[in-house]
Amino acid sequence: MSPPPDRSAYAARQAQLLDALLRGDGYPEGFVAAKADAAGRSLRRKRGRLVAHAWPALALALGEFFDERFDTFAREVDAPASGDPHEDGLAFARRIMRDGVQLSDDARVELLLTRAALRRRGVFLRVARLRRPYPRVLVVVRLPLAGALHRSFSLRRRAR
Amino acid sequence: METTRSITRLGQGAGWRPQIDGALARADGLGFIEVIAEDVGAEGLPDGVAAALRRGLQVVPHGVSLSLGGAQRPDPARLAHLASVAERVGAPLVSEHIAFVRADGRESGHLLPVPRTHEALEILCENVAIAQEALPVPLALEHVATLVEWPGAEMDEANFVRALIERTGALLLLDLSNLFANAHNHGYDAYESLARFPLDRIAYVHVGGGTFRDGVYHDTHAHPVVDGVLHLVEGLFALTDAPGVLLERDDDFPPEDEMNAELAAIADAVRRGSAHRVAAA
């Protein structure tokens, strides 16, 4: 009679593989690196597709650079525990802004609205000056009980 | 244990997604839809799924998060949810994957393969037994496409799946796109492998699209079904009469007439294969 299977050793091997695939590095012995690279890229790309669906303006703003930038981000930062692509996209947007990427107005609006919507407690207030679709000041506020609200104030001179 | 005769006849099917709800409602000749169990809430059903039930279609809940191939035993809450969805839709069976999706508290976000070893098979059989105990209907298991393989395999995929199905009494969700992908990417003959799967235990068949990139085949479910997969459909039905064939699409949804053309192409492949089988009998 063979001994019962060792679930904890099995768990360790799976954790090791998953970690290496997510990082894109450090594959355990015996894995073919080229195939593991492809598998890891596929994992990160799938995650990126979910974020692009949740943040279309961000994806559009980054265009052909979205995939590469997201892949770099994904190798360092795990998806949020909630699995929510909005949260994931927020973390990604913050990272690329920190890296100096200028977002389009549409992407900035998306960012502010999502940040307000994701807040669960307290007050959130941000003001942004935008050019599109017309010169305006966007005020985004999240209040307890009221939720997230936004209002644009035009900066165009009124025609007389 | 289900005998071949008592496996429910399903006919032609399509994966239900809200984006193609209208197109599916208008499609001719569908016998069933498959619904991702995790996309159904704790109560009720998406309108399109309820409507499909009213039109007389069968609904098969398809789980993606049980991680039956993982080291942990399946989560009772996830099992309860899958069971609940099965009851709500009056499902003839449910399906899940021969894969793991989490390890050390981290989600993979994707179905990852299990090592094809006797030890992994033991753990998988235990997990499947736990799942079967918790479910009110038969469980079908789907093998997955993978770009990377574990070293030290003690069996090939056909033998591993056969052993798993025989030991657990589970049904088989035969995914011809996954078979095509793995055979292409890992260098073996898809037809030779297909013949050694437990074909008498098929609950239904998956057919999905994919694309070649730099010589590697990617099972994307976001592209048309490639000819090689349609040939496998024909090849399968030349060997056996499977109870159902389901078209899967997850992204970049095609226009309605393109979807209908794909469904028709699959139905044609089924007919051609069946004609060979009947002629040879």
Image: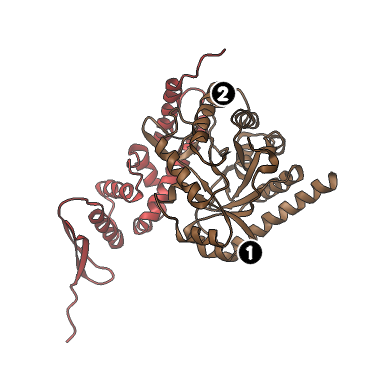
Chain colours: A red, B brown
Mark 1 or mark 2: name the one nearer the start of the chain.
Answer: 1
Going by the numbered disc 1, the residue's amino acid type is Asp
* Outermost residue toward the bottom in this view: A160
A85 sits to left or right of B196: left
- The reply to whether residue B109 is in sight is no
The N terminus of chain A, quarter of image: top right
- Displayed quadrant of residue B79: top left
Residue nearer the viewer, B268 or A157: B268
- Displayed quadrant of residue B102: top left
The C terminus of chain A, quarter of image: bottom left
Residue B3: x and y in percent read 68, 38
Residue A71: x and y in percent read 39, 43
Label ID, residue B28: 1
Residue A122: x and y in percent read 15, 52
| Crowd around label 2: few <14 · some 14–19 · many ≥20 (10 Å) | some
- Chain of the residue displaying label 2: B
Q: Residue at x 52, y 30 (%)?
A: B129
Label ID, residue B1: none
Of tags 1 and 2, which is closer to the observer?
1
Residue nearer the viewer, B158 or A26: B158
- Chain of the residue displaying label 1: B
Residue B212 vs B185, above or below: the answer is: below
- The reply to whether residue B129 is in sight is yes
C-alpha separation, residue under disc 1 versus residue under disc 2: 44 Å
Label ID, residue B117: 2
Residue A52: x and y in percent read 39, 53
Question: Tag 2, which secondary structure?
Answer: loop
Residue B124 vs B222, above or below: the answer is: above
Going by the numbered disc 2, the residue's amino acid type is Thr
Question: Tag 1, which secondary structure?
Answer: loop
